[in-house]
Image: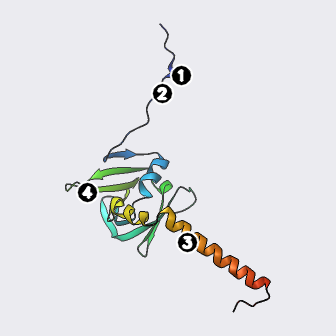
Amino acid sequence: MIHDRSNTRIPAPCIIDTGIVVNKRDMFQILKDLGRVRYQHLQDGQLHAEGEGYIMEVFADPERSTLIANHTIYLNVYSFDCLEMRKSRASESYFDLIQDERKVRLIPLSNPLQEQAPRSKFDAATIEAVVAEVLSAKLDADIDLDDGMMPF
């Protein structure tokens, strides 16, 4: 009996709370929503730097650097071989970005569940009213300019 393996697909990985992520897109997906973090830079197991910062940008570019300075963090997933998702003894999530003997540990200080609520403050009616007001003001300004009035 011959089995056709071309129709057999291996399911994509499913990692929940702990595990190692090597796919750059998956690393990007996890990191982009972290927000405020405490970071630790470890080299050969020795702590070299630590602090708090805000993740300003996550990107994938083999020609750019990961930068951590002045409480801002710009993460390039190409700077690391993998991301290890872990939990502390207190069940707090943290993320280790690993490249050879270098590890950048990111410990979230913000909670995406709490930070999503303020975003929903503006409903469609509020946004529509603001857009209508802006368009009306622009139309009034255009009419004034057409009548020869100077916009002082």
Q: Is residue 101 visible?
A: no
Three-letter code for the amino acid on which mark 1 is drawn:
Ser
Q: Secondary structure at mark 1?
A: helix
Along the line of sight, which residue is nearer the eye, 77 or 98?
A: 77
Q: Are marks 4 and 3 in contact (CB under 8 Å)?
A: no
User: Left or right: where does residue 44 sit relative to residue 81?
Assistant: left
Q: Which residue is tagged 4?
A: 92
Q: Secondary structure at mark 2?
A: loop
Q: Position of residue 59 (x, y in %)?
A: 52, 58
Separation of residues labelled 2 and 3 (CA atoms): 50 Å
Q: Position of residue 139 (x, y in %)?
A: 69, 76
Q: Point out the tag, 3 or 1, that comes first from the N-terminus.
A: 1
On residue 6, the disc is: 1
Separation of residues labelled 3 and 1 (CA atoms): 55 Å
Three-letter code for the amino acid on which mark 3 is drawn:
Val
User: Left or right: where does residue 92 sit relative to residue 112?
Assistant: left
Displayed quadrant of residue 31: bottom left
Q: Quadrant of the C terminus?
A: bottom right
How crowded pointer 4 is (Cα within 10 Å; few <14, some 14-19, many 20+) is rated as few
Q: Which residue is tagged 3?
A: 130
